[in-house]
Amino acid sequence: MTLSIANDATTSVPILTCPPSLVPSVPENYPFNGLSDAQTALMKDFRQVHLPTIFAALTGLPCDNEQLFTDDPCLLRYLKATKWKLDESAKRLQDTLQWRREYRPTESDTGPMESHAALGGQYFSGFDKKGRPLLILISRLGGSVKDYETSIRFSIYTIEKGIRLMPKGVTQLAVLVDYSDMSMFNGYPISVTSKFMGVLSRYYPELLGTLVVVNPSWYMPVALGLLSPFLDPVTKAKMHFSNPNDGQVIKTEAGTGGWCNILDIVDAEMLPVELGGSFKFTFDAQTYWKAFLDIPM
C-alpha cells in the first residue's frame, strides 16, 4: 500500500501520530498469535511463576508505568531476545526493572536536555510501512555535544517517548541514521555510542526493528569496525545501508543486512527529502521540543 498524504508545503511539525493506513491489524489473541503451544506455555510460566519472584526481589520505589515492562508483548520480547530461554529472560527482566527503579528513565529533568534536543541530532517523525515510529539520527551533529552523560540520558528519554508513540500491535522502532558528511571529527566518540548501545541491548531487548544508515560516508566502514565488538549478531543483521543518490558506494561488513532501497521500508511521504523521500521537513527546535514534551509518558 502506498501512503498518500498532502505534503507539498515545507513544515516543521513532526509526524507523531501513526496514520490509520499504517496501523497494523491486531489479532484477537495478540500477542499470542503465531506462537506454538510450547511457547505459549513459556509465556504463561513467565507471568505466573517468574514475575511474582522478580517483583519480590526488587528494591526501591516502582517507576511510573512499570506495567509497560511487564505486559505480555514485553515478556514476549524478552523471550525472543534469549531464544526462549525462560530463566535467562526472567533474569534480564529483573535486571531491567531494577535498573529502571534506580535510573528512573521516565522521570528525568528535561531542562538540561533541551539544548541537546535543539541540535536536531535525534528526533522522531513519521512511521515506517509496519507502523513503527521513525527515530531519525543525524550523526554529524554529535560533535557539538560536550555533556555526554546528559546526552545519553536524553537519548534514553527519547527511546521512552518512542515506546509511547507505538500503536497497538507495534513493539519496535525503526531507526534512520543520516551518515552524510560524517567523519571521526564531527560525531559522537565511539565510547559514548557503545555505552548507549549497551543500555539498549541490556534494558530494551528486541526494541530495534530495523536500522538504515542513509548516505554513508567513507567513515562508515571504520566506525562499524570499531563498533562491531559491541554489536550482537541479531542487532548487526538488522543494520542496512541506503544511498538514494549514488547507489552502493561503500563495501558493507559481513553480518549486516547489506544494501536496501529505503523506500521499501518507509513511504516517500513519511521520509524527509534529504533521506530520499518527499516529506519537506525542516527541523525547528522550539516546535519539536513542544511536540516532544507533549508525548505522554
Image (tube, rainbow, N blue to C red):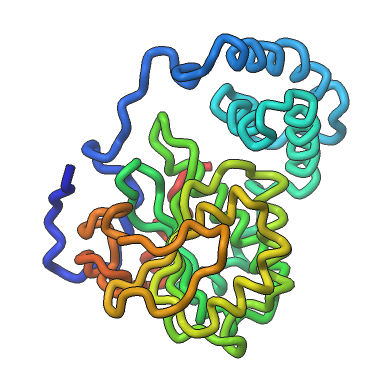
At a point 39% along the width and 35% down the height, the residue shown is 167
At a point 54% along the width and 14% down the height, the residue shown is 36
At a point 64% along the width and 10% down the height, the residue shown is 41
* 286 over 106 or under it: above or below: below
Q: Which of 51 and 191 is in front in this view?
A: 191
Q: Nearer the viewer, residue 194 or 168?
A: 194
* 45 over 126 or under it: above or below: above
* 256 over 170 or under it: above or below: below
Q: Nearer the viewer, residue 266 or 96?
A: 266
Check the image and name the residue furthest to the bottom.
185
Would residue 91 be seen by someone viewing this image from the given angle? Answer: yes
Quadrant containing the N terminus is top left
12 sits left or right of 78 in the view: left
At a point 40% along the width and 45% down the height, the residue shown is 132
2 sits left or right of 254 in the view: left
Residue 263 placed where, x, y %? 27, 58
276 sits left or right of 197 in the view: left
Q: Identify the image quadrant of residue 60.
A: top right
Would residue 66 be seen by someone viewing this image from the given angle? Answer: no
Residue 217 placed where, x, y %? 46, 82
Q: Nearer the viewer, residue 208 or 166?
A: 208
Residue 183 placed where, x, y %? 55, 87
Q: How many labels does the image show?
A: 0
Q: Identify the image quadrant of residue 243.
A: bottom left
Residue 8 placed where, x, y %? 12, 66
